[in-house]
Amino acid sequence: MGSEQIVGQALASVLPKHQKSWFRIPHLLHLNFILLVPLLSPAVGGYDGSLMNGLQALPSWKFYFRTPQGQTMGVVNAAQSIGSVLALPLAGFISDRFGRKKTLLCGVITVIIASAIQTGAVNLGMFIFSRVLVGMGTILVVQPSPMLISELCYPTHRGKYTSLYYTFFYLGSVVAAWCTYGAEKNLGSSDWAWRGPSLAQAGFSIIQLIMYPFLPESPRWLIANGYITKAREILARFHAGGDSNHPLVEFEMQEITTGISSEHAQHKTSWSSMVDSPGKRKRLLITISLGIYSQWCGSSVVSYYLPLVLESVGIEDPKTQTLINGCLQLFNFFAGVMAAFLVDYLGRRALWNWGGIGMLVSFVIWTACSALFDQNSQNNSAGMAVIAFIFIYYFHYDIAYSVLILSYPTEILPYSMRSKGLSIELGVIYGSLIVLSFLNPIAMASFGWKWYLLFCVILVISIVTNWILLPETKGRSLEEIAELFGDSTTEVIPSEKENIQSEVSHVEEAEVVKEGPKAPQISSFRN
């Protein structure tokens, strides 16, 4: 597939002409390796969700905490989401004020501390507190990471990497699922059957902490905060092999600086600016609606209550439940990775529409089979069909929401809206999880399979909404995507572009001789 089909003709024309694969080019290999630091962020959240599925199936955990049920179980599962919502305003503030990288570090340290507390929990209150703290740490690593990835990626890799990002949620799920399965099989009734997997929750964060010193800051954040020379150095080092005068570096510096300068000059950095034009209101509507649909499409039933779903079709053995959970998470991970590599070929709209229709069909059949089993508990075929369609449903969820839920909003939101918009979306996601954590166990106990009908209706609405609202972003840079929403790609007229580029050069020259930790702010670029 040609570069112009991935990033557009203008950007493709300035890309270095490499004659070998990216993994044989040292600076690109280095960049893609250190991007593993933000890529591992969703694995922290994925580990937690799968961990709770596994722990609910462990007799040792049930015995130690006296088998939480109903509202109590809802609090246990909602605790992580509550912590995430509480930390969201802080995450957005730190990310914009102090940088994506420092926000990530705060989250990594918080998760490690929370995992230690959860491992040593002596009562349910302490366990719930640790999960609130895990939620706070999770949001501090998840919120800045997709921005850091999209703003650091080599242009032709951006679509794949940003789409690959949330599939790492399932990497965490896989590790947690098999940890709990192994603990149940080998440790039995020992407390370490649940304390061991709780301790392992810190694993991904420890890896991130070790690699953290090698991770650069976002060039866009650096430019927005006046660190022009540093931004150029990072772009040159990782995109052009150290050539700071390469046409690609010049193109990226010009495009980023012009767009950010325009937003600052027009004072478009406040919360109210997110709704000051039709294009921005459409972006915000898309971001919020995707956050809602990602949880209210039925995925939350399995994400935190798979044991209840399996018990509803007669599968009650803990080993079997944890085994199915482990296989499902492994399946999800590979399905998501496959879809991430199809993003630049099929496009975003194709995956949204394919995934939505597939989810609806499989969830309807899942619901029908659950109803048949409810009427006749001896109907083993219906029970097995439910398990099969859980996998089919998740395949379609993975190719749409797992790969695009954060990468798509990151692409369509301009720089001034990006951090705030992702905070809003994550607030909607985790707010929905709080509600559903309480509703799902109560509703499933009261209504059984009839509760699934609500999700079928929401799936229909989501398909129609996404079909109408979501534009195709393939083949455009982050700044060029603005055209899809009726905005100019830069919002600056040509003569202003020349002045801005001239001022950037003056600022960079001044930085060479100026002593001090920080360069002039982006406001100095205004005409």
Image (cartoon, rainbow, N blue to C red):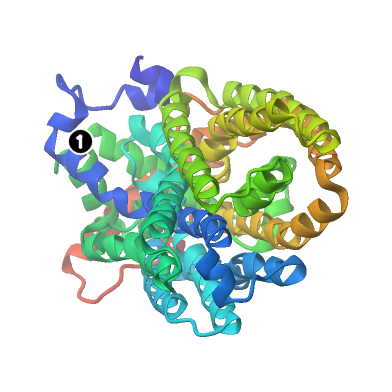
Q: Is residue 218 visible?
A: yes
Report whether 198 appears left or right of 18. right
Q: Nearer the viewer, residue 358 or 199?
A: 199
Residue highlighted by disc 1: 246
Q: Is residue 220 visible?
A: no
Identify the amino acid type marked 1: His
At 63% from the left and 63% from the top, the residue drawn is 270
Q: Quadrant of residue 399?
A: top right
Label 1 environment density (alpha carbons within 10 Å; few <14, some 14–19, many ≥20)? some
Q: Nearer the viewer, residue 289 or 266?
A: 289
Quadrant occupied by the N terminus: top left
For the image, the number of numbered tags is 1
Above or below 96: residue 337? above
Above or below 346: residue 257? below
At 39% from the left and 71% from the top, the residue drawn is 192
Image coordinates of residue 60 in percent, x first then y, are 51, 69
Q: Quadrant of residue 210?
A: bottom left
Image coordinates of residue 236 in percent, x first then y, are 21, 44
Q: Residue furthest top?
A: 1
Above or below 338: residue 93? below
Image coordinates of residue 472 in percent, x first then y, are 59, 25
Image coordinates of residue 394 in percent, x first then y, are 59, 34
At 28% from the left and 66% from the top, the residue drawn is 209
